[in-house]
Image (cartoon, grey):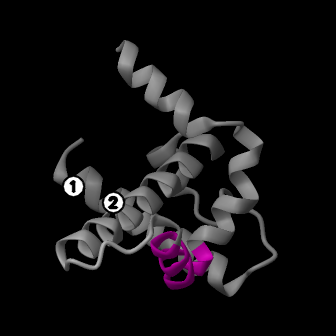
Amino acid sequence: MTWDEHRRRSAALDAVLAYAAANPAADLPMTELPALLALFGDRRGLVLALQHRWSQLLWARLSASTVQGGALHSVQVWRECAAANRVLRRLLDRHLPEFGDAAQERLDELATA
């Protein structure tokens, strides 16, 4: 992935989160934001990208807690991250079950590639 693609995907995820914040009961904005299909392929690809963002945010918080010497309990760090990223967490809680363990499936795909 090029830096340009990374920036476009990141901006698209920001747009999805903004849309979800403004429309909490709405589904994923696949028709409202038509560029999502070109960037992520389908709903599963978008949900996996949202999951990846969550993983990065959570990892950063976990790393910061150990670097600062606090070594916060991982559940506490998860809760803090969820509180700071409510819209993202809401989307994941709502849509990840549609795909089973999509994150694990993707990890398996990468391991065999």
- SS at badge 2: helix
- Residue 29 appears anywhere in the view: no
Residue placed most toward the observer, 35 or 5: 5
> Which dot marks residue 8?
2
- SS at badge 1: helix
For the point 78% across and 71% down, the residue is 26
For the point 38% across and 24% down, the residue is 110
Picture layout, residue 99 above or below residue 69: above
Where does the image place residue 21, in percent across and percent down from the top left?
Answer: 64, 83
Overall secondary structure of the magenta section: helix
Indicate left or right for 81 with 32 as reference: left
Where does the image place residue 80, in percent across and percent down from the top left?
Answer: 49, 81
Picture layout, residue 12 above or below residue 99: below
Which stretch is magenta?
76-87
Residue contact between numbered discs 2 and 1, judged by CB atoms under 8 Å: yes
Residue placed most toward the observer, 26 or 30: 26
Indicate left or right for 45 with 96 as reference: left
Q: Which residue in the structure is indicated by mark 1?
A: 4
- For badge 1, the amino acid type reads Asp
